Image (cartoon, grey):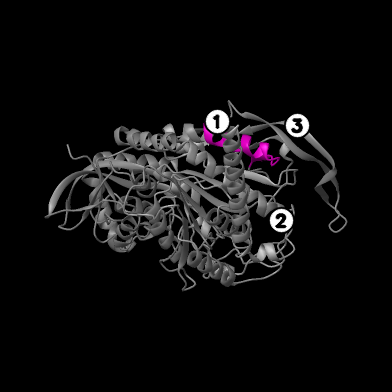
Amino acid sequence: MSKFFTLLVTVFLLFSCGTDSKKQAVQAAKKHPTPFENGNGNQTATYEEVIAFYKNLAADFASIQLEEIGLTDSGKPLHLISFSKKSIDWGSANEDKIKILINNGIHPGESDGIDASMMLLRDLATGKVNAPDNLIFSAIAVYNVGGSLNRNTSTRTNQNGPESYGFRGNARNYDLNRDFIKADSRNALAFYKIYHKINPDIFIDNHVSNGADYQYTLTHLFTQHDKLGNAAGNYLHSKLQPELETRLAARNLPITPYVNVFNSSPEKGFSQFMDYPRYSTGYTSLWNTLGMMVETHMLKPYKDRVLGTQAIMEEMIGIGSENVAEIKKARADSFKTYKTSSSYTLNYTVDSSKADTLDFLGYEAVVGINDLTGNDLMTYDRNQPFTKKTAYQNYFKATDSVSIPDYYVVPQSQWKIIELMRHNHIKMEFLPKDTTLNVTKYRIANYRTASSAYEGHYPHSNVQVEEEVVALRFRESDMIIPTRQPGMRYIMETLEPAGQDSFFKWNYFDTILQQKEGFSSYVFESTAQKILSENTDLKKEFDSLKTANKAFKESNYQQLDWIHKRSPNYEKSHLTYPIYKWNKK
């Protein structure tokens, strides 16, 4: 009887302790309320309130670490908040920990993640949300500081709350989610510091969607798994995404892939959004991080969006902590694959031969006459919800590939490129002395340039190159970049001119597109005649072109320019890409 009584007392004490600890956690959380919680569910914290909240939290809890890192275009630093039950040593690899990095407020009008992260970090610190021992959870408080300070009530035209918020453009009016490669902003340089400091296993960027209407509050935009590729891409597609969907469904929070349609009904089917390296998850995938954007639906109540965003982050913590070894292995195996690959894919297209099928929760699309314009207008009837089988094209296939050299050679004159490599922790070596190397040289054979500005640039596209192996003399202190290193994908994506977000695309080399020297027709004509008389093959090609092309035949300048470009007088730098590929053996 005494043993039974002792057991009852023990059970009672354990239950009481558990109940007391939960009560204490709730009480501790109440000491740090957020502006979102203090309001009516339709307010988001100002920038000043966010930073003050985290400073107070860090002062009260040893598990919260607050750091100021870099500068942004606004003149203020980025604030990184990290939670861990044990003190964090950023100098170690932390391979026994799941490292999760959250980005908030890249578009400050999409503020859901700002408020959700404040509550989650507090709840982790107080114990209101169970925190695994192997977790390092970090969040950028507000990435677009300048946009957050530019507070207004009207620029999110399609969005249902909050009552006031920040602006999409940053202090210099850049959309920061197009800047992760071109790095026009100080924000991007500060992000590099944070990302490479943490080397996260999982990265989440919190957003709000635009476009179609449907029943979901939550959508996800995982980095495209075929582009991520290898073990990491397979894990993300076959395990991480389905597990997140299952866990959220158990919380009565259905989620669907980001609905990538505009002015069209989703029930017709849609494709996955391709996150090129200019985007946050496209950038982090270059280091095999498992990336996802949260896209809450613009028309759903703000409170539901914020709480849903918090729920996603909570479930990702659970998935990450329970599968840390498998996630680490998937990333490590992907790095190993690239160490031995001979080629690299730059461009992809939708693979229309296969697709997944969604049980999509939508609303019937209705086309009627717009009272204002008198033209057809498609709307959605929320009184007609449906569940329909919908094709989701989330498989992509390669459209090209390039060889991976042992090294890229970057002349020291290209100092902007070298600086960006350093910011991204790319290992480089100086040439110890003037050296002649047999390298592959690219000539820009064709390209198109945007006719209107896009994020401060007139980017190039449809880039075609011609290759030639040549012996070139390089100077002491020119830079060689070995490709077989953790940042290999960043190197390939930026230095190969045909890449979707190459430095060439973003106008870093536009000086080579303009000739610096020309000719006067009346002076060069005699030289041109001499060149043709001494080169019979060139003369035959010239005569053939005159016969076939009337415009060419009738233009003195076109004919002389054609000859000039094939003469010793033509400058070698024109259209010559000033980065070179070198195989050491």
| Residue nearest the viewer, comparing 111 with 425 | 111
Of callouts 3 and 2, the N-terminal one: 2
Of callouts 1 and 3, the N-terminal one: 1
Within 10 angstroms of label 3, few (less than 14), some, or many (20 or more) residues?
A: some
Residue type at tag 1 = Asp
Q: Secondary structure at mark 2?
A: helix
Which residue of the protein is positioned furthest toward the front in this rendering? Answer: 1
Label 3 vs label 2, nearer the camera: 2
**Image x and y of residue 567, in percent:** 26, 51
Q: Secondary structure at mark 3?
A: strand
Label 1 vs label 3, nearer the camera: 3
Left or right of 560, for residue 158: right
| Image quarter hosting the N terminus | top right
Residue type at tag 2 = Lys
Within 10 angstroms of label 2, few (less than 14), some, or many (20 or more) residues?
A: many
Give the residues drawn in magenta, as a range: 239-257
Residue visible at 72% across and 46% down? 212
Q: Which residue is mark 2?
A: 303
**Image x and y of residue 434, in percent:** 12, 55
